[in-house]
Image (cartoon, rainbow, N blue to C red):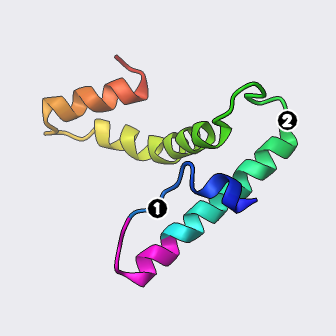
Amino acid sequence: MINNYGGYCSCRVKTRRWPMAFFINCLDIAAVNALVIWLYKEPTWNARKTNKHCQFLRELGMQLIRPQMERRSKQAGLDSHIQQTLSTNLGNR
């Protein structure tokens, strides 16, 4: 099952450090497991799409970083281009 999803859309990066490679591999496995559980609970989610795994990873990643982005956007003294990028990604345009 992991071979079907893992190579197409992955967190994998080229590294010589085995702890980093191990951590990234664990992230990939956890993402596939989360997708399998999600599709079991919501079988009609993106039923007609072929890239469900990548879409799921994008949404999962955004949900995980959203609280940090919101905290960061409220920081004083932040460069204007960083504030604009954060606002765009948070949907505050």
Q: What's the CA distance linking mark 1 and mark 2?
A: 27 Å
Label 2 neighbour load within 10 Å: few <14, some 14-19, many 20+? few
Q: Residue 43: which numbered mark, if any?
A: 2
Question: Which amino acid, mark 2?
Answer: Pro
The residue that label 1 is drawn on is 12
Which element carries disc 2, helix, strand or loop? loop
Q: Quadrant of the C terminus?
A: top left
- 87 to 77, vertically: above or below: above
Measured as percent of width and height from the top left, residue 44 is found at 83, 29
Secondary structure of the residue carrying numbered label 1:
loop
> Mark 1 against mark 2, which lies toward the viewer?
1
Q: Which residues are magenta?
A: 14-23
Q: Which quarter of the figure is the N terminus placed in?
A: bottom right
Residue 28, image x, y percentages: 58, 61
Predominant SS along the magenta part: helix
Give how far across and how far down residue 31 sits, in percent.
Answer: 63, 56
> What residue lies at 36% left-to-right and 81% top-to-bottom?
17
- Choose the circle earlier in sequence order: 1 or 2: 1
Q: Please indicate whether residue 83 sits to the left or right of residue 79 in the image.
A: right
- The amino acid type of the residue labelled 1 equals Arg
The spot of residue 79 in percent (x, y) is: 13, 36
Viewer-proximal residue, 19 or 68?
19
